Image (cartoon, rainbow, N blue to C red):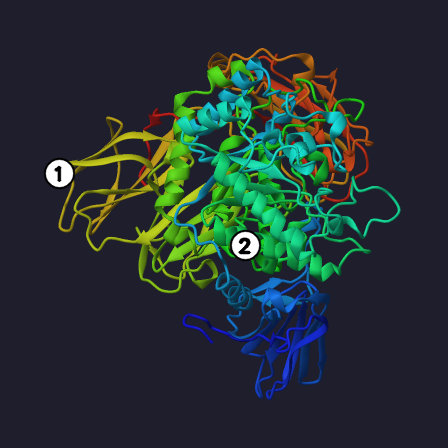
Amino acid sequence: LRPGWRFVSKQLRLEAKDGTAFRVGRVEVFRGEISDPIAHEHKLRDGAFLRLAESNGPPRAGLFAVLQNPFVEWTRTENRIALAYAADMDWKPADGPFLSDRFCLGPCPLSGHEIPAALVPEWKYIPGATLPGGPCLDWAEVEALTDCVRAFLLVHPRVASRVHVGWCENDFQIDAATPEGRAEYKRIIDQAAALGCRHLLYSPANSALSSLAENRDAWAWENILWFGLGQKIRKDEWIPGQDALPDSVREMLAYAKSKDVKLLAYVFPSMAFLQNPVWTKWITKNPPGGYLGADTGDRSFQDWLVAKLVAFQKQTGAGGFSFDHWWIGYDDATSKYAQWAGCRRILEQLRAQLPDAVLDGRQQYHYFGAWTWLAGSYPHPLASDEQPQSFRAFPDLHLDRVSADRQRSAAWWYRIHNFCPPEIMPGFIGHQTPRLDAQNAVRRDRFRARDWDTLGWHYSLLSSIATAPFQHVVNMIPARDAEEFAHFSATDQKWFRDWLDWTDANLGTLRHVRPILGQPMLGRVDGSAAFDGTHGFVFLFNPNYRALPAEFALDATIGLNTGGKFIIRQLYPDAGRGQLLAPRVGAFWNFGDRVSLPMPGADALVLEISPAPASPAEPLLIGLAGRAVLKDDTLELNGVTDEPGRVREAKVVLPSGQKIRAVTVNGFVTSFQQSENTVSLRVTFTGAPFHRCQQIGSFDPKFTGGKFVGAMAIPARIFQQLAERKRQWPITYSDEEMAATWLASHRLLLFVNVAEPSDKLAVQLKIDGQPVTLKRAYTSVLPQVAENTFVGWYADVSSLEPEVAHEFELDLPPLAAGQFQGLFFDNVETEMTAEVTPPSTP
């Protein structure tokens, strides 16, 4: 029991006093009896949660009992429990005493806030978006075990990491051996630096150092490893710390340093390094290579690899390493436990020698759970490969939003099912550019260098901050393509950078971030919250195109455990930055109140919650974006804006004792009521409403396919908005690029939104009685792995006449009730107006 721990632990120490080697077989670390009756057991990969029976009523307390590895043998007979694992590994006394993995036992006073233990399959359509029944976890159990994991972290970030991943813009297509290639890569470094990134995973080709023909790994990426020196390191033709760095590598390292960016090297620990035949002696039927590589369970290999990595870092100044292809499941090498423990030791040794290095963990690594991740910076973003074919897409036309929804879904799995502390939770900002052509071949030439999602990236950035505030992993950025690079504005760069800076400024609070509202699901709003005392933040996301309400309570379910009256300030969307949200009753929110907020489709909402002032020194405007000023006994509301057609109930809390006789809104006198120090008024904003993800008609949960008919007039201002976007982002896209629905966002797209869509279904559209061609949209652009990448049908309707009521007719195949989510316009952003009509008395 150590200071700060809310659990006790046990670890076995074994050493041979006579100095002889020995073999560790099965290790039973704990065997004991729980004296209280056990009412319920929830099995985990590394142990179990136990709930203790009460004489009257349901259990109010429980325990977690875990062993720190993913190979645990858990047994329970009534109240007797035991935890063991099969190490099956040789041990040399020269390596010191053998220490077993640690057993931890901790109490869990139950909160009553329960979460379904089973995962809903990603983006499965469930009518009503109801959560599954069955066993549940109590939030107190999740928190207790997460705190236990946190106690063993070897990395304690004071600021968030900011890592740009070059391969997500297909940087492997760039040849850094050529001046042209280096110039292109310098644009990537420039843009990454402008966005606030401090590290960059550097993985271009370098034809002067390596070639595709020499690759010996299963994925054919060896030529880009170790800054292009991977093949030479494998063959001992270039030795870190001894041989000079090639000029092309030195030039890029120096350029990155001039921009305050450190490069990360891409490394496969599973490569078939041949410096010592012991490492590959398990390979008997075929020569080493492909998936047949070094045995990470061999201690001499671990020591050699760590020494090479440290020497490489010291010589190059690398900011760290991205470890991919951790192939730790060989059947004929040392035991799988020994291979896993070897990988863990490699990371622990690196962390001890390079305490500030970014250690990015990729494929295989994330499968083995939190005890594997203690020394690394974070496990695999998205909990899968990032390319679109590798995960199920949420039905959305914007790839950054699709990837963001996947990131939050993965964060739920990491947090609730793997007890991952926020400090090492992986973020994911942006997307990975598709890299497969129509023949399903990975293109090594210049392919899809232009791929910036101009409308999806804000949502993606906030999604990542909301779930993984310590680990910003930035993916495709507008840099390789000279036009995208030139037209990505300084304003947008600052917006991106400011939110990362905001994260650092609030890390003390964001350390407490937790998911709220349940698992991200189709048909639901999801979110997260972080509170430090009575101050905190709430992040809300509506991934659906349908407008839906976000509902939560100001209580312990969001991490707010005490308080009286509160104000809720909107930090995002930008159009309402600083706006205070109005409760239904009174001027301020009370502890325990339920908050219900309408959310437009495919959008985010960021809120700051803090104690309300006892008596404001200046007028406090609530329910509107704008400024409130007192001039004698007149209250002026200036710069007030909102969406056209919106009606707002607003309040102003005045300094104590202030009485007013008139109120103006943007210069116009308006009616009002005053009760004590609170003024109430209603403001109506001029214009026809047309919202983000504007829906034609409404959602019918009983509709089962067939004919759908709706009508809509498109305001002229929408086409003006699209024209202005084209002016600010004047990129000329090819026909092939236009197939990516997240590009060319000056188009007005009409989206047929079906839950769990299939590209095998036939859907037909008529507008004003005339057939219109519907195209199929894929996150991979081409129909690759369609069950993962197909998102629905769309038409470009940019040529429709404005201010005219158009009739839209869809013919749909038979569907499950409610599976048709609706017909929506896309690429329209929320617009604001300062024009108000004379409001009536509230």
Image position of 673 with respect to 74: above or below: above
Q: Residue 34 appears at what percent x and percent y?
A: 61, 85
| Residue at 58% across, 74% down | 11
Q: Residue at x 54, y 54 (%)?
A: 349
Amino acid found under the numbered disc labelled 1: Asp
User: Would you name the residue on which mark 2 appears?
Assistant: 349
Give the x, y percent position of residue 545: 60, 36
Q: Is residue 588 above or below residue 604?
A: below
From the viewer's side, name the closer residue of 759 and 403.
403
Residue 548 seen anywhere in this rendered image of the structure: no
- For numbered disc 2, what is the local secondary structure? helix
* Image side of residue 211 versus residue 567, left or right: right
Q: Is residue 219 visible?
A: yes
* Point 76% across, 35% down: residue: 216
| Residue assigned mark 1 | 633
Q: Residue furthest right?
A: 285
**Earlier along the polypeptide chain: callout 2 or callout 1?**
2
Circle nearer the viewer, 2 or 1: 2
Looking at the rendered structure, the secondary structure element under dot 1 is: loop
Q: Are marks 2 and 1 in contact (CB under 8 Å)?
A: no
Q: Nearer the viewer, residue 500 or 267?
A: 267
The CA span between labels 2 and 1 is 70 Å
- Residue 687 location in percent, x, y? 43, 24
Front-lying residue, 814 or 135: 135
Relative to 491, is 288 above or below? below
Q: Position of residue 514 (x, y in %)?
A: 49, 55
Q: Which mark is residue 208?
A: none
Label 1 environment density (alpha carbons within 10 Å; few <14, some 14–19, many ≥20): few
Packing grade of label 2 (10 A; few <14, some 14-19, many >=20) is: some
